[in-house]
Image (tube, rainbow, N blue to C red):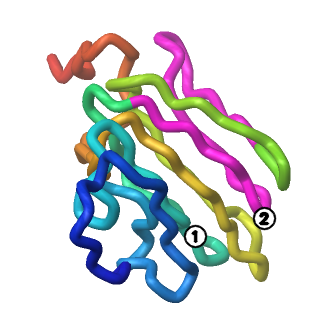
Amino acid sequence: MPTPDTTSPNDRVHLVRAGELSGTTALSGGTTGSKRLWMGLVETPPLSATGNHHHGDSEAGIYVVSGHPVFVHHDGTREVRTAAGPGDFVLVPPHVPHREENPSPDEPVVVVIARTTQEPITVPVPELYRMGGTEPDTTP
């Protein structure tokens, strides 16, 4: 954790060194007193994927440091797979169900994520469904 400081969190610049990361969290309300921002470093191992989820009211900006992640979402009619690579930026709008995949058998994916909330919000969803919060049709 960062070294405690007696000054107000909103009247100084904050530095969180690599060795002071709290899990994957670098900047948040808990680490720096941030009011509207969460930022962290996330590593996805080879041949793995997150569960389907969305980030509530938060936008998520993603910068790919290394690896080749695939971002999967539903566009209202079909599943869409967006491949990214080092140096690419990705925006995930609020409430858009998606998942991240790492199809590489031997290379981890490393990304820096910034969200417009002070803490990470991850809301699991059972499957990818149409944007706008429309649940999948489960009628027989």
Q: Is residue 54 magenta?
A: no
Measured Cα–Cα span from mark 1 to mark 2: 9 Å
Which residue, given by chain and number where applicable, does mark 2 sit on?
67
Viewer-side residue, 32 vs 21: 32
In the displayed structure, does residue 62 sit left or right of residue 68? left
Residue occupied by mark 1: 44
Q: Within 10 angstroms of label 2, few (less than 14), some, or many (20 or more) residues? A: many
Q: Which amino acid, mark 1?
A: Thr
User: Is residue 67 rendered magenta in the image?
Assistant: yes
Q: Is residue 17 above or below residue 117?
A: below
> Which quadrant of the rendered structure holds the N terminus?
bottom left
> At 46% from the left edge and 61% from the top edge, which residue is drawn?
14
Q: Amino acid at mark 2?
A: Gly
Q: Which residues are magenta?
A: 59-83
| Image point (83%, 51%), residue name | 85
- Left or right? Give the position of 63 relative to 113: right
Q: Earlier in the sequence, mark 1 or mark 2?
A: 1
- Furthest-bottom residue in this view: 19
Tell me the SS state at disc 1.
strand
* Nearer to me, 11 or 95: 11
x and y percent of residue 102 in the render? Answer: 65, 62
Number of dots carrying numbers: 2
Q: Dot 2: what SS?
A: loop
Q: Where is the C terminus found, in terms of image quarters?
A: top left
Q: Residue at x 41, y 59 (%)?
A: 27
Residue 29's x, y, as percent? 25, 54
Q: Which is nearer the eye, 110 or 7? A: 7
